[in-house]
């Protein structure tokens, strides 16, 4: 989900400040965020390096253990239960539910429905938190948490109820597919600035104040932290791959060969 990029950038801020406060680099009274357009807290280079290591390990473990296991399980179950089954190739969510019930066990369909419900709740939470990060960080606009939750849940749930009542299961399934296409198409536009900014020291440079031992003068040292050239190449290639796949998806949709 494209909005997860904003959430990932936002949740790390409290981790940075916690490191600086624990290590004694800043006072706990320094506000996190912005005040009148000026950022009150700036993470130290020590916090940035520590949180980068922590985030890399956290991401690697989640991707190559939990996420790998879950996605592999999905592919294995789908291949074992839906491959070469009448109606399996063109089945929508409701059709997959029925096929899982008939080919594996009634409990399999229930687990599938429960997984969809939990994934929807998770996506709603991510959208709410990402919207909070964008509103407070970019627009300097904040509202009460309960009101934010009511608004975001209403936006995500009410259209589904209206569509389900108006056009039934088929329309609801097409709407879900369309929403996934929109999210996929948006991804290159959201990730392009991220790849661009992290490839240049112009944007990825940390200023560190150092005091000279001899005369006590404060000197500013510029520490470059842009991506390594190899990582930059990989990031650009991945972005190009995603972009080409999205163009192909739109072309196939226009020709009526994808659903």
Image: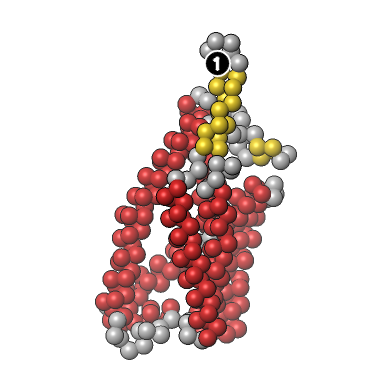
Identify the residue at image location x=47%, y=71%. Answer: 245
Is residue 238 in sight in this rendering? yes
Look at the picture and state if 32 lies above or below 243.
above
Q: Which image quadrant is residue 56 in?
A: top left
- Looking at this view, name the residue that lies furthest to the top: 214
Q: How is the image coloured?
A: secondary structure
Q: Nearer the viewer, residue 17 or 94?
A: 17
Image location (x, y in percent) of residue 57: 37, 44
Residue 21 horizontal side relative to residue 158, left or right: left
Is residue 43 in sight in this rendering? no
Q: Nearer the viewer, residue 66 or 160?
A: 66
10 Å crowding of disc 1: few (<14), some (14-19), many (20+)? few
Identify the residue at image location x=60%, y=16%. Answer: 217
Residue 55 horizontal side relative to residue 17, left or right: left
Look at the picture and state if 136 lies above or below 223.
below
Q: Which image quadrant is residue 147 in?
A: bottom right
Identify the residue at image location x=42%, y=50%. Answer: 230
- Looking at this view, name the residue that lies furthest to the right: 36
Residue 216 horizontal side relative to residue 140, left or right: left
Q: Nearer the viewer, residue 156 or 244?
A: 244
Identify the residue at image location x=59%, y=22%. Answer: 219
Number of residue marks: 1
Task: Give the residue number, with chain letter if any, for mark 1.
Answer: 212
Image location (x, y in percent) of residue 250: 53, 77
Element type at mark 1: loop
Residue 104 horizontal side relative to residue 111, left or right: left
Look at the picture and state if 99 lies above or below 158.
below
Image location (x, y in percent) of residue 181: 52, 72
């Amino acid at each position: 989900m494209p909005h997860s990029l904003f959430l990932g950038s936002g949740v790390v801020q409290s981790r940075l400040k916690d490191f600086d406060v624990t290590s004694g680099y800043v006072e706990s009274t320094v506000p996190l965020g912005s005040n009148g357009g000026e950022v009150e807290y700036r993470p130290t280079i020590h916090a940035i390096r520590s949180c980068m290591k922590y985030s890399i390990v956290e991401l690697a473990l989640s991707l190559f253990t939990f996420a790998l296991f879950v996605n592999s399980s999905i592919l294995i179950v789908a291949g074992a239960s839906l491959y070469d089954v009448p109606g399996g190739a063109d089945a929508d969510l409701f059709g997959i539910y029925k096929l899982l019930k008939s080919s594996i066990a009634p409990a399999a369909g229930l687990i599938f429905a429960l997984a969809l419900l939990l994934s929807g709740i998770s996506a709603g939470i991510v959208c709410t938190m990402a919207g909070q990060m964008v509103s407070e960080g970019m627009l300097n606009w904040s509202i009460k948490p309960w009101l934010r939750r009511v608004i975001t849940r209403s936006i995500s749930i009410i259209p589904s109820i209206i569509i389900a009542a108006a056009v039934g299961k088929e329309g609801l399934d097409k709407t879900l597919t369309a929403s996934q296409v929109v999210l996929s198409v948006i991804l290159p536009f959201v990730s392009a600035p991220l790849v661009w900014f992290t490839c240049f020291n112009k944007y990825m440079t940390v200023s560190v104040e150092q005091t000279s031992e001899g005369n006590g003068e404060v000197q500013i040292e510029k520490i470059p932290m842009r991506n390594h050239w190899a990582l930059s190449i990989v990031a650009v290639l991945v972005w190009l791959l995603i972009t080409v796949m999205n163009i192909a998806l739109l072309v196939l949709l226009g020709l009526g060969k994808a659903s």
